[in-house]
Amino acid sequence: MSMRTIMMLLSIVGVLVLSGCTDGKAIAKVNGATISEEQFLAYLKLKRIPQQDTGRVERVLDDYLEREALTDAIEGSDLLDQVAIEEELREFKKQILISRYFERYLIDTVNEQAVRNFYAANPEQYESRQIKASHILVRTNPKMSDNERQALLTKAHEIYSKAKAGEDFAKLAEEFSEDRVSGKKGGDLGWLKEGAIDPKFSDKVFAMKPGEVSEPFATTFGFHIVRVDEGVKAVKRPYESVSGDIRYQLRQQAKEAEHKRILESAKIKKY
């Protein structure tokens, strides 16, 4: 194919692309085989090349036609394992068909309304129990002897006795707590989500009443004296923060169900 012919084809394609024509007209022939405009525009779409970018479209067409010519020339070569190539093509076709089918199926099946309906129908999955508490920590470590741990437990009880006697809990936390972060804030831990903290701590605190101060109890961090500042409340996570998780969950379920449905309708015999 001469350069003049190629340039002429490029000009034609530029005009066709800009005019938005998609009537399947021939834009080239390679060894007698027609290359249609529809084929080439589908290729541009596959490669995500904007039709309006005429300069790039022209360069792509040149490469497209060259590869068509090369493929046609070597397709029947004895150097190629035709059986292996055919199987590779079959596998690639399977992959593309399955991928494209489920991509389209899931877009139609798991839409925005489906996600919102699931959120509305399953409120308990997106609610958490929270409680507002403060604590005083007497820290321990695994290397301590029993006597050392007992001495710290005694210290914790002394602090607890001061709190029960009416001394200001926040001042006691500032003075005695070895959790320096909360200690500077009078022991304030803020709102705690059930299950998101140490299990022993969570079980103890969520069983307490507002205003109640606990006796010292142990966790892996040490001995805690806890005061519940505000009782348990249910907090629902906003739709925007969970919609992505819901969509993923529904897509997985829908894909598995459709996969199973299709295979159940298939007739497979293995010899």
Image: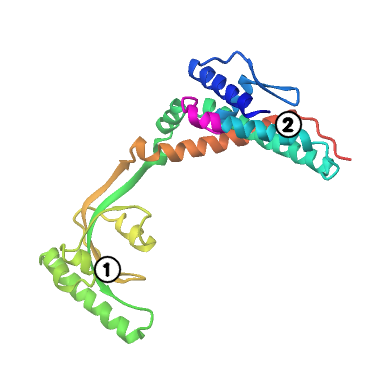
Q: Residue at x 49, y 30 (%)?
A: 55
User: Is label 1 in contact with label 2 (beta carbons under 8 Å)?
Assistant: no
For the C terminus, give its image quadrant: top right
Using a 10 Å C-alpha cutoff, classify the residue at mark 1 as few (fewer than 14 neighbours), some (14 to 19) or many (20 or more): many
Whether residue 106 is visible to the viewer of this picture, yes or no, is no
Three-letter amino acid code at the position of disc 1: His
Q: Nearer the viewer, residue 267 or 236?
A: 267
Quadrant in the picture for residue 115: top left
Q: Residue at x 19, y 76 (%)?
A: 158
Q: Position of residue 183 (x, y in %)?
A: 18, 67
Whether residue 203 is visible to the viewer of this picture, yes or no, is yes
Relative to 138, 239 lies left or right: right
Q: Position of residue 168 (x, y in %)?
A: 10, 65
Please provide the residue range marked out in magenta.
47-59
Three-letter amino acid code at the position of disc 2: Glu
Describe the element under mark 1 as helix, strand or loop: strand
- The label shown at residue 265 is none
Nearer to us: label 1 or label 2: 2
Describe the element under mark 2 as helix, strand or loop: helix
- 50 above or below 236? above
Mark 1 and mark 2: Cα distance apart in space: 58 Å
Q: Residue at x 30, y 58 (%)?
A: 205
Q: Is residue 168 magenta?
A: no
Disc 2 target residue: 264
- 268 above or below 153? above
For the N terminus, give its image quadrant: top right
Residue that extends furthest to the right in the rendered view of this protein:
271
Disc 1 target residue: 224
